[in-house]
Image (cartoon, rainbow, N blue to C red):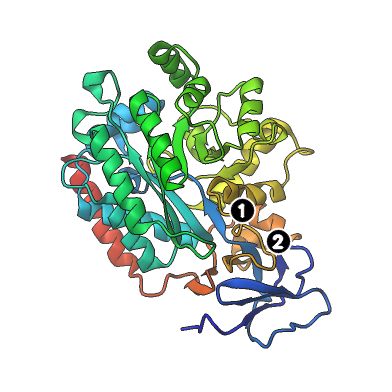
């Protein structure tokens, strides 16, 4: 195992997403300590990793996911449905989630993300059937075992079908239980500072599955505990209509009235905001997780990313749940976002580097971690290294463009905080065949009931 205290030079990469680092970077003690320019040599005494076959990116950051949904990929009952009927088909299955099934679903999701070059991931877990009260604790344990950096959200729902919401009664909790567990999780797991590997945020599911009281109480608790907040917003036109009927206002107005329109908050989707609302988001420093694959699969619409950025809104990328993607591959999400936004805005406004920026610096803004998402001195040593030796890359010109345009899928090496979490395209110690076997068995048990 590499000594994290020893400096290592990621030497002479084929290409690197950084200026003035043509000969690579030196990392030590979990940090990037030096960029080595063209014709230069490291000033730091270091071992080296020959990166001549690798394209080096900042570790990708996933800003929206539902790990448990890997257990319901391509579920027949949910195919060819828009969001609300899709949820109605899936909630009864998710209500059968067990701790053992969740652990397998989380392991699959985090492993797939790591192998795609993702070094930091969020998760939005909001279903808590009886017996699954320790769901977030299970996720923390898996993250520590795999060595991935996480911002796990304590999701919640307290408006069920009996209250006019969508989820069944069996997966929701009362407000007191939600707030008490939120406080417990932050006290137990939330790490602060630039080296943090595990952080906790608070995340009511959506305006149609929680009460206004819970939204306001969550905002107050997040301020008290100094943690971030997350929710779905403006994903579909149906949601806009629901908000207007239920609360008498549009979703962003409801968010602001609930104390959520601020720099603590990042929102999933953000498709159906108007121009004035985008300016309000930018002024508040509220950020958006763009989920290109999910939005296309559910036909929810297309997030107006360039308009958002012009309004001052930082944009990150999220793979979203594996029941609406149906994968957890963040490098593929970069390509999907690039193509979707290129089609919307044209070749002069969206380049492959924009898509890479959304998945790195933009996503770092969403999770409130400015030390991530960039290859620069002082930043975290979170790196994703890709080879271009597959048939899909044959004949490529620009290596960075090839990653996006030719469809890079799997990283060869991934470093998190100076530690190799992926080597030679594999996660050390992970028996993938056994994981697939057990995960498929758990998925089948859930799906058939």
Q: Quadrant of residue 394?
A: bottom right
| Viewer-side label of 1, 2 | 1
Residue at image location 42% in from the left, 43% down from the top: 224
* Label 2, residues with CA under 10 Å away: few <14, some 14-19, many ≥20: some
The residue where tag 2 is placed is 17
Q: Quadrant of the C terminus?
A: top left
Task: Quickly name the residue at label 1.
Answer: 360
Please state the horizontal and vertical placement of residue 121, each as a whole percent of the image. 47, 54
Label 2 near label 1: C-beta < 8 Å? yes
- The Cα atoms of the two marked residues, 1 and 2, are separated by 10 Å
Question: Where on the picture, by quarter, is residue 292?
Answer: top right
| Residue 273 place in picture, x, y as percent | 58, 24
In percent of width and height, residue 391 lies at 60, 62
Query: Around disc 1, counting alpha carbons within 10 Å, would you say few (fewer than 14), some (14 to 19), or many (20 or more)?
Result: many
* Placement of 431 over or under 94, stated as above or below: below
Quarter of the image for residue 211 reads top left
On screen, residue 73 versus residue 30, left or right, reads: left
Query: From where the camera sits, is residue 215 visible?
Result: yes
| Between 73 and 372, the one nearer to me in the picture | 372
Residue at the image position 52 percent from the left and 80 percent from the top: 4
Helix, strand or loop at label 1? It is helix
Residue that appears at 75% across and 75% down: 36
The reply to whether residue 209 is visible in this rendering is no
């Amino acid at each position: 195992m590499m000594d994290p205290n020893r400096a290592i030079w990621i030497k002479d990469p084929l290409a690197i997403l950084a200026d003035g680092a043509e000969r690579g970077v030196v990392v030590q003690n979990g940090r990037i300590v030096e960029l080595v320019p063209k014709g230069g040599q490291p000033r730091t005494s270091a071992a080296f990793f020959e990166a001549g076959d690798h394209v080096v990116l900042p570790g990708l950051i996933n800003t929206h996911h539902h790990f448990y949904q890997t257990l319901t990929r391509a579920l027949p009952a949910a195919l060819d449905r828009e969001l609300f009927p899709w949820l109605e088909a899936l909630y009864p299955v998710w209500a059968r989630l067990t701790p053992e099934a969740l652990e397998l679903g989380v392991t699959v999701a985090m492993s797939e993300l790591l192998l795609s070059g993702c070094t930091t991931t969020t998760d939005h877990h909001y279903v808590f059937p009886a017996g699954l009260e320790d769901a977030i604790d299970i996720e923390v344990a898996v993250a520590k075992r795999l060595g991935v950096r996480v911002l796990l959200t304590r999701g919640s729902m307290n408006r069920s079908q009996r209250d006019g919401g969508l989820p069944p009664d069996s997966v929701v909790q009362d407000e007191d239980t939600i707030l008490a567990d939120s406080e417990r999780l932050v006290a137990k797991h939330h790490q602060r500072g630039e080296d943090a590997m595990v952080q906790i945020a608070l995340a009511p599911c959506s305006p149609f599955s929680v009460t206004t009281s819970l939204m306001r109480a969550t905002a107050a608790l997040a301020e008290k505990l100094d943690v971030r907040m997350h929710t779905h917003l403006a994903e579909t036109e149906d949601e806009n209509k629901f908000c207007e009927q239920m609360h008498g206002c549009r979703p962003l107005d409801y968010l602001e009235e609930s104390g959520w329109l601020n720099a603590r908050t990042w929102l999933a989707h953000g498709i159906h905001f108007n121009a004035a609302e985008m300016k309000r988001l930018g002024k508040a420093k509220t950020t958006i997780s763009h989920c290109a694959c999910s939005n296309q699969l559910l036909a929810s619409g297309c997030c107006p990313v360039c308009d958002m950025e012009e309004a001052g809104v930082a944009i990150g990328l999220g793979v979203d749940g594996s029941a609406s993607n149906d994968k957890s591959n963040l490098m593929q999400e970069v390509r999907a976002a690039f193509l979707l936004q290129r089609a919307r805005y044209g070749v002069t406004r969206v380049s492959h580097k924009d898509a890479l920026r959304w998945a790195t610096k933009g996503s770092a803004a969403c999770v409130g971690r400015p030390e991530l998402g960039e290859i620069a001195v002082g930043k975290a040593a979170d790196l994703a290294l890709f080879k271009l030796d597959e048939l899909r890359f044959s004949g490529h010109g620009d290596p960075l463009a090839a990653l996006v345009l030719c469809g890079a899928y799997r990283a060869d090496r991934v470093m998190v905080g100076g530690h190799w979490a992926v080597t030679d395209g594999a996660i050390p110690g992970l028996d993938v065949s056994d994981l697939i076997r057990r995960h498929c068995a758990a998925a089948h048990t859930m799906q058939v009931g």
